Image: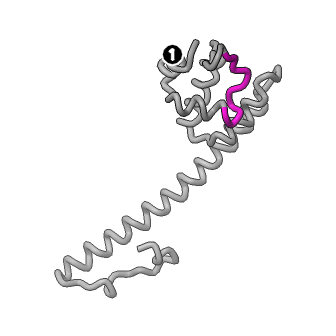
Amino acid sequence: MYIGKISKETGASIKAIRFYEEIGLLNDVMRSGKYRVYNENHVTLIRLILKAKSLGFRLSEIKVFAEQKNSRAPWACILSMIITKTTQIDTELSNLKKQKEELLNYKKNIVDCLEHNPTCSLNKIELDSPRTERL
């Protein structure tokens, strides 16, 4: 099948498909004259790439898996990548929770200050966190 058809079947743009081929994610693409000819294995791989991207994997990480596709058991590689990614997500969630708590604390301080003094100034708000440079 040609690039337009595989693009429609997978939902990947033509530009993305060409890029995947350029960086080595899609190999063994046949040519018929000046046209690229894709097969069902390419459809499966593009769908896998899109799913992995939607789960937060970078193309460089996906390439590690794609290079193992000819291996009889790429499962160890896949499991390792999943464990690493879930650990990263757990860390990010923890950091986001702390950030949310800090923001809610600032919100409370501002509301409390405004309730007691409608012209409350910034220097009256407690900004005792080490992350104050972000405000």
Q: Residue at x 52, y 28 (%)?
A: 14
**Of the residues shown, which amino acid type is indicated by label 1?**
Lys
| Segment colored magenta | 22-31
Q: Residue furthest left?
A: 118
> Residue 98 at x, y = what percent?
49, 62
Residue at image coords 58%, 12%: 1
Q: Is residue 87 left or right of residue 116?
A: right
Q: Is residue 95 left or right of residue 45?
A: left
Horizontal side of residue 103 vs 68, given as left or right: left
| Mark 1, residue position | 5
Front in this rendered view, residue 106 or 88: 88
**Does the magenta-highlighted stretch encompass residue 114?**
no
Identify the residue at image location x=57%, y=24%. 47
Quarter of the view holding residue 74: top right
Residue 132 at x, y = what percent?
46, 77
- The correct choice, above or below, for 16 with respect to 9 in the image is below
Residue located 69% across and 40% down the image: 61
Q: In terms of depth relative to the viewer, which is nearer, 134 or 10?
A: 10
Residue 63 image-quadrant placement: top right
Residue 120 position in % (x across, y down): 23, 84
- In this view of the protein, which residue sits in the foreground, 25 or 4? 4
By secondary structure, the bulk of the magenta-drawn segment is best described as: loop
- Mark 1, other Cα within 10 Å: few <14 / some 14–19 / many ≥20: few
Instruction: Classify residue 53 by image quadrant.
Output: top right
Secondary structure, mark 1, is helix
Location of the C terminus by quadrant is bottom left
Q: Position of residue 21 (x, y in %)?
A: 66, 30
Name the residue furthest bottom: 123
Residue with the most extreme front position: 33
